[in-house]
Image (cartoon, grey):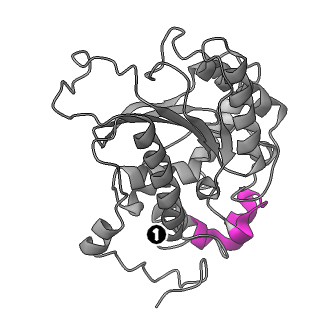
Amino acid sequence: MDHPAGARPLTGREVPEPATAARRDAIAIPDRLDATLVLVRHGESELIVQGRFQGQAESPLSATGRRQAELVAQRLARPLAPPALPLPEGPPLAIVHSPLGRAAETAVAVATAMGADDSFGRAIPRRADDGFKEIGQGAWEGLLGSEIEANDGERLAVWRRRPMEAWAPGGERLIDVRDRVRPALEELLAELATAGRPGSIDRPQVAGYRERATDQPWTVVVGHDGVFKVVLLTLFDLPLERFWMWSFDVCGISVIELRAGRPVVRAMNLIEHLAGLEDAGAQARSDERAGSGAL
């Protein structure tokens, strides 16, 4: 039987999903879809500065986070500036973002920069989608990592090592996160399919031989480290046990291209646009947090 989120025995194990269930739960990618998804994590928040677990707790961007949002917005508004981002030409179809304030604030910066840039020539539609909200971390939200280690250290250790076996008390299980991510992602892909035209896999697929796709539709998604991990596992049909294989820095850019319905990583966690930040400690804090289990 299922246990309430975060309340199951730590000695137990999540029942593995049978292969038939995995296929049933696979995301529906439109047939022969040629399109691009750009994933952008939000800027540094005040809770990140304090070393506290966020989850779905609200936390505004810090001063550094606002500057990070401006820099990633400028980069996306001028994607062909050297070194060029692997993006189609023209404006994105939409900017979709988590409704949490730190993601919304970052998305507004991106929309503002794109709308002000002459190369796009029009405002880009922006909307919030609950499907891309960060993973809920229940009783851990707002607590320092050291507090959780002291009071719930065993559960935290299992979460860091085997995330299908333990999660924050009152928080979300990864399987439940995937269940809300999948329809949100399918909606985006369906919109891209409607806006574009079917492609073919019978063309050069090796970098350097393949012609650059210039007329594909593309969409920007502004969200969070934890939910983006699940987005990629869902998109690439990988097991949730692989949760920790991806890492997303604050205001990093990742580009996933759909080639005739087959997802391909074109860029992962680009952060060169943040190199000029005066607060050099922001990256160190991000690296430390990436290994802590905090979302």
Q: Residue furthest bottom?
A: 1
Q: Is residue 84 magenta?
A: no
Q: Tell me the SS state at disc 1.
A: loop
Residue 149 location (% of width, % of height): 67, 64
Judged left or right of residue 279, residue 125 is left
- Going 67% across and 45% down the picture, which residue do you hit? 127
The segment highlighted magenta reads 138-156
Judged left or right of residue 266, residue 124 is right
Can residue 43 be seen in this snapshot? no
Residue 179 location (% of width, % of height): 49, 67
> What residue did someone put label 1 on?
164
- Going 62% across and 47% down the picture, which residue do you hit? 224
- Going 43% across and 22% down the picture, which residue do you hit? 86
Q: How many marks?
A: 1
Relative to 79, say whether 32 is above or below.
below
> Viewer-proximal residue, 172 or 47?
172
> Viewer-proximal residue, 80 or 9?
80
Relative to 152, say whether 268 is above or below.
above
Q: Residue furthest top?
A: 82
User: Which residue type carries mark 1?
Assistant: Met
Q: Main secondary structure of the magenta part?
A: helix
Q: Is residue 153 magenta?
A: yes
Residue 38 location (% of width, % of height): 51, 34
> Viewer-proximal residue, 129 or 267?
129
